[in-house]
Image (tube, rainbow, N blue to C red):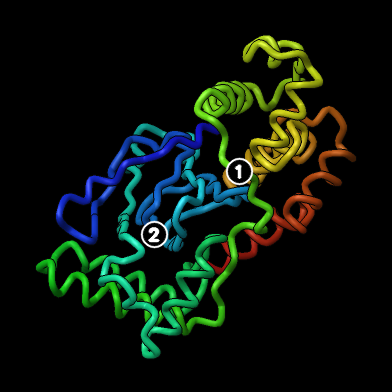
Amino acid sequence: MKAYFEKIPMGTSSLFLFERRDESFPFDWHYHPEFELTLIVDSSGRRFVADSSADYGPGDFVLLGPNLPHSWRSAAAASDLRPRHTAVVAQFRPDFLGPGFFELDEMAPIARLLKSSALGLGFGHTAAGRDAAERFMQLSSLPPTRRVILLLSILCDLANDPGAQRLSTGHVLPLCRPDDQERINVLCRQLERSFNEEVDFKALARLIHMDQASLCRFFKRATGRTLTTYVTELRVAAAARLLIETDLSLLEISFRVGFGNYSNFNRQFKKVRGLTPKDVRRQFHVVETVAS
């Protein structure tokens, strides 16, 4: 994971707003000193925030605090007909309404919200969050002054949403040095290409010119998880997509994503997701039947 410093092109504005449209969202592990509100309009895949990762889809709406490493990595396209991946992003400075503005008594709820965003907050699953996301989509059509006013209103509503979901654990380790960031990036790209194969620790260590023991310590220190845990999460995420999108048997899925043992597949899947593979497929089929 390449946690590099991103320079936001603010210019003389206190708010930077843009719509991101790409054929895919590549893994792009970065951080910046601005707050960030991101709404996923049309994409699905895996969201990484600090020491956590989770699946995301359309409607994913999160607030990230300053210098919090993050990235969205879209899933492989099901076909060439899949629409482009789209997200709306707003980035703003801590003092975007002037020094001391959020220290005012009237701004206390928003001040608490911004403080809590240091761990990342998710709102896409709540009614208040969905309503705020709809209004968030209107920002780009407004003149600058009304844009700032609407953003403040959205933050006010999010501040009063009791269903906000904390995205990371708070056990975030210091960001890597530039040389370490590049090494993590190399490792993660290799693991994402070969997660369904047996992990070759020696080959990974050679990639970044380390011995095997140093590799394991380095990865844990930089990402907050072991190499084995990271690969398991990648395998479970891939298995979940196959459970929902295909009729492959559970046994075939377990081998396809790299679990050589079916019992271990069930055990690890439940550990990561809180549900068994059968539960996930059963729930999806129920939803599919009701929808049809």
| Residue behind mark 2 | 35
Answer whether residue 118 is visible to the viewer in this image. Answer: yes
Going by the numbered disc 2, the residue's amino acid type is Phe
Q: Residue drawn at (30%, 71%), measured in percent from left and top?
A: 99
Q: Residue drawn at (73%, 31%), measured in percent from left and top?
A: 227
Secondary structure under tag 1 reads loop
x and y percentages locating residue 117 in the rendered image:
50, 65
* Marking on residue 261: none
Going by the numbered disc 1, the residue's amino acid type is Pro
- State which mark lies toward you, 2 or 1: 1
Residue in the foreground of this view, choosing between 252 and 56: 56
Secondary structure under tag 2 reads strand
Q: Residue drawn at (63%, 25%), measured in percent from left and top?
A: 191
Q: Residue drawn at (40%, 47%), measured in percent from left and top?
A: 32
**Residue furthest out toward the right:** 263
Image quarter of the N terminus: top right
| Residue behind mark 1 | 174
Left or right of residue 55: residue 170 = right
Judge whether 12 appears above or below 248 on screen: below
Dot 2, how many residues are within 10 Å of its Cα: few (below 14), some (14-19), or many (20+)? many
Quarter occupied by residue 136: bottom left
**Contact, mark 2 vs mark 1 (Cβ under 8 Å):** no
Residue in the foreground of this view, choosing between 235 and 224: 224
x and y percentages locating residue 24 in the rendered image:
38, 36
Judge whether 76 appears above or below 132 on screen: above
Quarter occupied by residue 256: top right
Judge whether 261 appears above or below 160 on screen: above
Left or right of residue 126: residue 5 = left
